[in-house]
Image: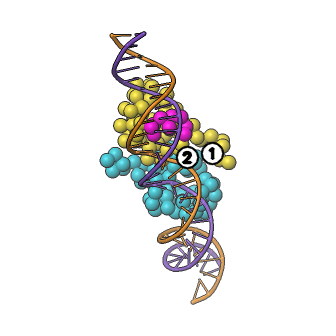
Chain colours: A cyan, B yellow, C orange, D purple
Amino acid sequence: MTNNLKVWRAKFSYTQQDLADKIQVSRQTINAMEKGKYVPSTVLALKLASVFEVEVMEIFNLEDSDWN
Amino acid sequence: MTNNLKVWRAKFSYTQQDLADKIQVSRQTINAMEKGKYVPSTVLALKLASVFEVEVMEIFNLEDSDWN
DNA sequence: ACTAAAAGTAAAACAAACTTTACAAATAGT
DNA sequence: ACTATTTGTAAAGTTTGTTTTACTTTTAGT
């Protein structure tokens, strides 16, 4: 799975800390997400979509490898 | 967070096992999700959305309590 | 160049997702 | 009613998400 978190965050001029506060996670969680270090929970995905007012799929995308 | 998994699954006449196979998890994982026993990963949410060809938000919805 | 803010990273600890096995309860078809 | 299929549930175990603390590196402003 890939994500455009960094792009959306830039678009809103939020720091990682700003975004972390908004969705109530630690800054490291935001950082690790942007770095693709792990797959966040659906609640986090929905919260991010809510913050940026977009669909989840505009932030997160499945890769072919997710189906293997 | 709530979900309409059961409704979507019924709409497609899939058994829990069918759906489990499609998104490659155990049947118990599907069952537990439908029962709201835990929050699935974003990969699973995206796979379900893909199977049912809908947006993630048509299956999963945030509750007010998710923001507290 | 200096400084402050932001971002990257890492390890330890804890919480939660997900699997496996196994069995009981409910549902549907004949 | 009988049987097969489907669903519910539970416990133990493994894996992975998330937090906390802390330190280093990068970026931006003056």
Residue D20 versus residue B54 in the image, above or below = below
Determine whether, in the image, residue A4 is placed left or right of residue B61.
Answer: left
Residue A68 visible: yes
Residue B7 versus residue A32 in the image, above or below = above
Determine whether, in the image, residue A63 is placed left or right of residue C3.
Answer: left
Pointer 1 and pointer 2 on the same chain:
no
**Residue at 36% from the left image edge and 48% from the top image edge:** A66
Q: Is mark 1 on a helix, strand or loop?
A: helix
Instruction: Name the quadrant containing residue C3.
Output: bottom right
**Residue at 55% from the left image edge and 63% from the top image edge:** A28
Q: How far apart are marks 1 and 2 (CA)?
A: 8 Å
- Percent x, y of residue D4: 33, 21
Q: What element carries label 2?
A: helix
* Magenta-colored stretch includes residue B60: no
| Magenta stretch, main secondary structure class | helix
Residue D24 versus residue D2 in the image, above or below = below
Amino acid at pointer 1: Asp
Instruction: Name the quadrant containing residue C30.
Output: top left
- Percent x, y of residue A35: 46, 62
Q: Along the line of sight, which residue is nearer the eye, B3 or B37? A: B37
Question: The residue marked by circle 1 belongs to what chain?
Answer: B
**Residue at 58% from the left image edge and 40% from the top image edge:** B1
Q: Residues within 10 Å of mark 1 (few under 14, many from 20)?
A: few
* Magenta-colored stretch includes residue B31: yes
Q: Along the line of sight, which residue is nearer the eye, A21 or A11? A: A21
- Percent x, y of residue B27: 41, 36
Q: Mark 2 points at which residue?
A: A43
Q: Along the line of sight, which residue is nearer the eye, B32 or A1? A: B32
Quick check: marks 1 and 2 in contact, CB under 8 Å? yes
Q: Name the residue under label 1.
A: B66
Q: What stretch is highlighted in magenta?
A: B28-37
Q: Residues within 10 Å of mark 2 (few under 14, many from 20)?
A: many
